[in-house]
């Protein structure tokens, strides 16, 4: 289990394109914008949610190379990317003080993550989004509003996270993305997961 208390990431706050209010992201409210370094690039490359405003929904996934729950959700994350990658921008967020930029890069490259891995040295973004464990999934709509936060599916909400993904009865991230792509609000907006 990886708890996120003293995370190691690089944060550069940009001019807020979304919300300037509050120090905590709230479901149904616009989120603060941010720029984070991509750990998979040798040359400094920054990514921002604002890049996708009006274009794509965004999924942020907090990961740790030392978290067995993160490992068990790699395939599910890959399936989400295959299913929604055309309309959704996926980002992994390095998520543990036990990881280093070098170790998380090696991990992500070995798994062929296929998405940028963001580095939040000061953990401002992690704290802002209220992330406590890895993996944690956030769904932000293309207008910059937080629509879902928490577990990938119902198996991650309890001791069943080791079960095969086919045993999942509720797929929260998948359902949230389907709803948004149909122009609807997600039915489930928050589910605490273990990690």
Image (tube, helix red, strand yellow):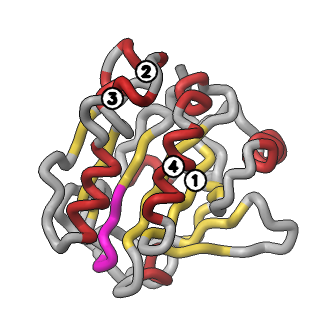
Rounded to the nearest angstrom, the CA distance separating label 4 from label 1 is 14 Å
Q: Is residue 66 depicted above or below 35 in this figure?
A: above
| Secondary element at tag 4 | helix
Q: Mark 2 points at which residue?
A: 161
**Residue 92's mark?**
1
Label 1 sits on a secondary structure element that is strand
Q: Which of marks 4 and 3 is nearer the N terminus?
A: 4
Q: How crowded is mark 1: few (under 14 residues within 10 Å), some or many (20 or more)?
A: many
| Sooner in the amino-acid sequence: mark 4 or mark 2 | 4
The reply, left or right, for residue 150 in relation to residue 103 is: left
Work out how far the residue at label 1 is from the one at label 3, CA to CA, in angstroms: 22 Å
On residue 168, the disc is 3
Rendered residue at 33%/29% (across/down):
168
Instruction: Identify the secondary structure beneath mark 2.
Output: helix
For marks 1 and 2, give the CA distance.
Answer: 20 Å
Q: Which of 35 and 195 is in front in this view?
A: 195
38 left or right of 137?
right
On screen, residue 42 versus residue 90, left or right, reads: right
Disc 1, disc 3: CB below 8 Å? no
The residue pinned by badge 4 equals: 79
- Secondary structure of the residue carrying tag 3 is loop
Magenta stretch holds residue 151 = no
Category of crowding for the residue at label 4, using alpha-carbon neighbours closer than 10 angstroms: few (below 14), some (14–19), many (at least 20): few
Q: How far apart are marks 4 and 3 (CA)?
A: 14 Å
For the residues bearing labels 4 and 3, Cβ distance under 8 angstroms: no
The picture places residue 75, in percent across and down from the top left corner, at 57, 39
Q: Which of marks 1 and 2 is nearer the N terminus?
A: 1
């Amino acid at each position: 289990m990886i708890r996120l208390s003293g995370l190691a990431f690089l944060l550069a706050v940009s001019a807020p394109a979304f919300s300037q209010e509050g120090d905590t992201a709230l479901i149904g409210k616009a989120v603060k914008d941010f720029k984070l370094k991509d750990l998979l690039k040798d040359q400094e490359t920054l990514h921002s949610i604002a890049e996708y405003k009006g274009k794509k929904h965004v999924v942020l996934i907090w990961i740790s190379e030392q978290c067995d729950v993160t490992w068990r959700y790699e395939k599910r994350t890959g399936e989400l990317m295959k299913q929604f990658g055309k309309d959704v921008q996926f980002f992994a967020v390095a998520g543990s003080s036990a990881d280093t930029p070098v170790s998380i890069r090696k991990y992500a490259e070995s798994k062929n993550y296929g998405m940028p891995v963001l580095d939040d040295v000061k953990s401002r973004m992690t704290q802002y989004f209220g992330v406590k464990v890895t993996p944690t999934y956030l769904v932000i709509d293309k207008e910059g509003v937080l629509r879902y936060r928490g577990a990938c599916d119902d198996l991650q909400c309890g001791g069943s996270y080791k079960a095969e993904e086919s045993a999942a009865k509720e797929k929260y991230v998948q359902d949230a993305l389907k709803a948004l792509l149909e122009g609807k609000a997600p039915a489930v907006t928050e589910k605490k997961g273990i990690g």
